[in-house]
Amino acid sequence: MSEMGIKQEGPSILHIDNQSAIQVTKNPEHHSRMKQLDLKFFWLCNAVERNIITPIYMRTDQMPSDILTKSLPKVKVDIFGKMLGLTNRATHD
């Protein structure tokens, strides 16, 4: 955020629906046990260690970003769309 000129107090919150991933980011000793990790993951671990990002657990059914990353049933699309402030303005007769 600072690179964009936005001042911020404290770390950015990153909501994650995988509790194991959160534990690995917070516990550096787990890194050596992980055989194949993408380099992007190590960036995240570094950001957590430096207190730039704080990962927090969010239940999968409360994760509105899934609408952008997964194929979902219409019910979920409607729920997550509302959570994101999106509405269906089209009407069908």
Image (spheres, rainbow, N blue to C red):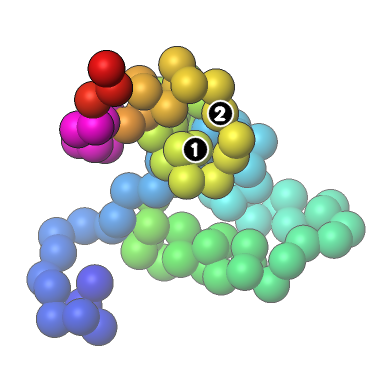
Q: Position of residue 53 (x, y in %)?
A: 38, 57
Residue 86 within the segment the image draws in magenta: yes
Q: Is residue 22 above or below residue 59?
A: below
- Which residue: 56% across, 70% down? 43
Identify the disc placed on residue 13. Answer: none
Q: Secondary structure at mark 1?
A: helix
Tell me the quarter of the image containing the N terminus: bottom left
Q: Dot 2, how many residues are within 10 Å of its Cα: few (below 14), some (14-19), or many (20+)?
A: few
Residue 30 within the segment the image draws in magenta: no
Is residue 31 toward the left or the right of residue 6 in the image?
right
In magenta, the rendered stretch is 82-90
Tell me the quarter of the image containing the C terminus: top left
Q: Is residue 54 above or below residue 85?
A: below
- Residue extending farthest right: 35
Q: Secondary structure at mark 2?
A: loop
Tag 2–tag 1 contact (CB < 8 Å): yes
The chief SS type of the magenta part is loop
**Mark closest to the chain's N terminus, 2 or 1:** 1
- Which residue: 43% across, 27% down? 77
Q: Dot 1, how many residues are within 10 Å of its Cα: few (below 14), some (14-19), or many (20+)?
A: some
Q: CA distance from mark 2 to mark 1?
A: 8 Å
Residue under pointer 1: 66
Residue under pointer 2: 72
- Which residue: 29% across, 22% down? 92
- Residue extending farthest front: 93
State the residue in front, 43 or 87. 87
State the residue in front, 62 or 75. 75
Q: Position of residue 80 (x, y in %)?
A: 36, 28
